[in-house]
Amino acid sequence: MMDDRNALFSHQTFARAIEFIWGEAELLDRRDYGAWLELWDLKGFYVVPIDPDTTDYASTLNYAYDDHDMREKRVQRMTSGYSASASDAARTVRTVSRFTLSSDSADVIEVKSSQVIIAYKRGVSTIFGADLSHKISMANGEPRLVEKVIRLIDSTEALSAIGFLL
């Protein structure tokens, strides 16, 4: 009987994590960056590595390696109207799918998935594909992002037009 309860808890937690990830994608597509910031644990990291295999983000070059302060500054830049990425921001549509439970502990769940983003700007659509990893804390009953890693499939190529949150 104990195994059934653990399996049910794990299934419900996984389902909540997927809903959370879909909600995050919707916030980003709507450019509701203030609400997106509120999804984060204060100690969390938003990471877009260049090296597709790295796990040591602090010691390698990344497109983004944002702690709380850097996430807030990135959002401020994007919403201030003073940067090119803010004044002429791409409209985006994200599809997140292929969810797999990577690890599940009492406090943090890790979900891996895939993401396709269509970004439209100045009459041109650009496609971005990525593997995602979300580490989500469930410790206080309210999901919080502890880490989000976006591994772009073409991360080692020269990329342009990624002036928005992935």
Image (cartoon, grey):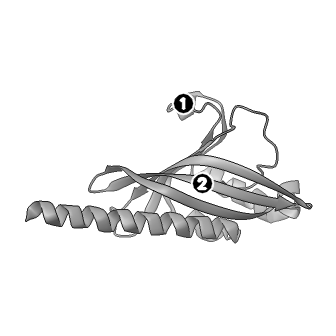
Could you say which is closer to the camera, residue 162 or residue 45? 162
Q: Residues within 10 Å of mark 2 (few under 14, many from 20)?
A: many
Tell me which label, 1 or 2, sits earlier in the chain.
1
Q: Nearer the viewer, mark 1 or mark 2?
A: 2
Residue 3's x, y, as percent? 13, 60
Residue 129's x, y, as percent? 65, 48
Quarter of the image for the C terminus: give it: bottom right
36 w.r.t. 117: above or below: below
Q: Secondary structure at mark 1?
A: loop
Choose top left, top right, bottom left or bottom right for residue 1: bottom left
Amino acid type, callout 1: Asp
102 w.r.t. 82: above or below: above
The answer to whether the residue labelled 1 contacts the one labelled 2, judged by CB atoms less than 8 Å apart, is no
Residue drawn at x 68%, y 67% as measured from the top left:
29
Amino acid type, callout 2: Gln
Q: Residues within 10 Å of mark 1 (few under 14, many from 20)?
A: few
Residue 34's x, y, as percent? 64, 69
Looking at the image, can residue 48 be seen? Answer: yes
Farthest residue toward the right? Answer: 122
Q: How many discs appear?
A: 2
Residue 141's x, y, as percent? 34, 69
Give the residue at mark 2: 115
Q: Secondary structure at mark 2?
A: strand
- Residue 59 placement, left or right of 84: left
Give the residue at mark 1: 53
- Residue 45 placement, left or right of 121: left
78 w.r.t. 44: above or below: below
Residue drawn at x 70%, y 65% as measured from the top left:
93
Farthest residue toward the left? Answer: 1
Residue drawn at x 30%, y 64% as measured from the top left:
11
83 w.r.t. 24: above or below: above
Farthest residue toward the top? Answer: 59
